Image (tube, rainbow, N blue to C red):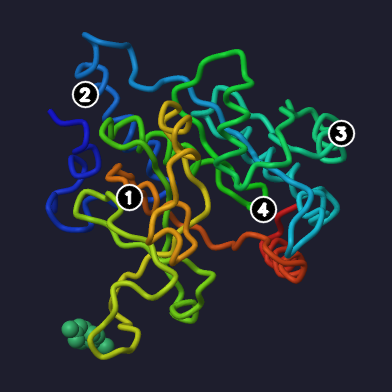
Amino acid sequence: MNPMSICSSSSSSSSSTKSWIVHGLLVGAAAAVAIGTHAYFFLGRSRRFRSQVIGIIPARFASTRFEGKPLVEILGKPMIQRTWERAKLASMLDHVVVATDDEKIADCCRGFGADVIMTSESCRNGAERCSEALQKLSKKYDIVVNIQGDEPLIEPEIIDGIVKALQYSPDAVFSTAVTSLKPEDAFDPNRVKCVVDNLGYAIYFSRGLIPYNKSAKVNPNFPYLLHLGIQSYDANFLKIYPELPPTPLQLEEDLEQLKVLENGYKMKVIKVEHEAHGVDVPGDVEKIERYMRERKLS
Ligand SMILES: *[C@@H]1O[C@H](CO)[C@@H](O)[C@H](O)[C@H]1NC(C)=O
């Protein structure tokens, strides 16, 4: 039994593109079914493949688009605290830490009970900060989830889903999540699109619309995918990932994750339901507060 077939085993249409889709809330159930298979498959070598998991929330104070963003209050609570509280609800994480270069952020996080790892100001992106934090931790972890601090409404089920996706895809070093793309976001370069193969491995990410319909218009019937900023890495891969030299497609699109694919590594993608957008610019704060009020979230 191939552990990669976890998603298709619960579906009769094993070779259609539907087979890899695991909805956020169903991930738990789907994975529970597969645990028996998985344990059996790996029993001879290790108890559970890549079992030790840490969630790291990278947070920096300086940002060109939004200075001090992690500390901005969303309905009266700092955004980083909201992200941390959501991450703590994920059942697949053995530990959650905030990795930051800023004392104000560190103080705030210790204040609400988070563990904090100080990282250098020279980290160029979240993955690099996660990599540095991982090296500073005394305990060994197999998987690192990079939980963006600007996603205060991230569902714990999505975190659990990408961890399980990586655990059940031993040939992948990276996992991430996508959701349905709204037609109005089709040509927005800040909304990154993704295409996957029949088993849910990423083929490509682009700021342009992919696939591109022959008519040069959005095809209302095509299930376009929007990439969500959450990702998890095999810990050994994370040690080398920031050191891999930039690649042509990565540089052209300005998408870090393309470096993974351009170097020939496999990336597992799960499809989830996720409506709320992250907070990128100050104007997004009001939008997310309105969204929360409408849904009576506090
Ligand atoms: C393009 O989109 C249209 C719907 O707008 C669809 O009918 C067609 O199959 C798609 N593909 C091609 C190659 O035209």
Q: Amino acid at mark 2?
A: Thr
- Dot 4 lies on which element? loop
Residue 261 has which mark?
A: 1
Residue at the location (34% across, 17% down)?
48
274 vs 78, nearest the viewer: 78
Residue 235 location, x and y as percent? 45, 27
51 vs 296, nearest the viewer: 51
Nearer the N terminus, badge 2 or badge 1?
2
Q: Does residue 27 appear to the left or right of 293 in the view shown?
A: left
Proximity of marks 1 and 3: CB atoms separated by less than 8 Å: no
User: For mark 3, what is the residue?
Assistant: 107
Image height check: is 185 above or below 295?
Answer: below
User: For mark 4, what is the residue?
Assistant: 150
Q: Quadrant of residue 215?
A: bottom left
Query: What is the C-alpha distance between the residues marked 4 and 2?
Result: 36 Å
Q: Does residue 179 appear to the left or right of 76 in the view shown?
A: left
Q: For disc 1, does the CB lie below 8 Å from ligand 1?
A: no
Q: For disc 4, does the CB lie below 8 Å from ligand 1?
A: no
- Dot 1 lies on which element? helix
